Image: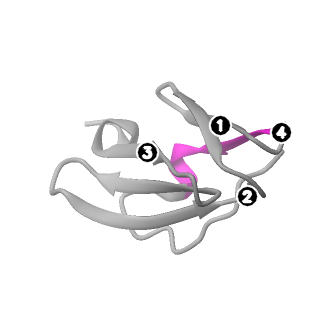
C-alpha cells in the first residue's frame, strides 16, 4: 500500500486541513498554512495541493506526512 493510500485529507473553515489514517481511522492532526478557510483540495499519489480563501495555493508531499501524526505540519507555497 502506498503512503497516499492510507491518508485522507479534509478541508476546514478554520484554515487547516485535517489528516486521517484511512487504514485505521485515526486522526493524524492538522496541516496548517492558509490564513483563511481551505476551499479546495487535490491529491495524487505523491502530493496534496490546497486552495484557500486567502487566494493562495499550497502543497505538501505525502511522504512528509507519512502515516504518523503530522502535528501542525506547515504547507509550502
Q: Which residue is mark 4?
A: 56
Q: Nearer the viewer, residue 5 or 31?
A: 31
Q: Residue at x 50, y 67 (%)?
A: 70
Q: CA distance from mark 4 to mark 1?
A: 8 Å
Q: Is residue 5 magenta?
A: no
Q: At which x and y percent is residue 15?
A: 65, 57
Q: Earlier in the sequence, mark 4 or mark 3?
A: 3
Please, which residue is most extreme toward the left here? Answer: 24
Q: Is residue 59 magenta?
A: yes
Rendered image: mark on residue 10: 3
Mark 2 in CB contact with mark 4 (< 8 angstroms):
no
Q: CA distance from mark 2 to mark 3?
A: 14 Å
Mark 1: few, some, or many residues within 10 Å (few <14, many ≥20)?
many
Q: Which residue is mark 1?
A: 50
Q: CA distance from mark 2 to mark 4?
A: 10 Å
**SS under mark 1:** strand
Mark 4 in CB contact with mark 3 (< 8 angstroms):
no
Rendered image: mark on residue 33: 2
Which region shows up in magenta?
A: 56-64
Image position of 8 with respect to 14: above or below: above
Please, which residue is most extreme toward the bottom here? Answer: 71
Amino acid at each position: 500500500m502506498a503512503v497516499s493510500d492510507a491518508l485522507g485529507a479534509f478541508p476546514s473553515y478554520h484554515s487547516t486541513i485535517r489528516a486521517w489514517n484511512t487504514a485505521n481511522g485515526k486522526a493524524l492532526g492538522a496541516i496548517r498554512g492558509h490564513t483563511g478557510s481551505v476551499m479546495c483540495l487535490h491529491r495524487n499519489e505523491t502530493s496534496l495541493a490546497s486552495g484557500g480563501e486567502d487566494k493562495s495555493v499550497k502543497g505538501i508531499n505525502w511522504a512528509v506526512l507519512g502515516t504518523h501524526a503530522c502535528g501542525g505540519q506547515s504547507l509550502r507555497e
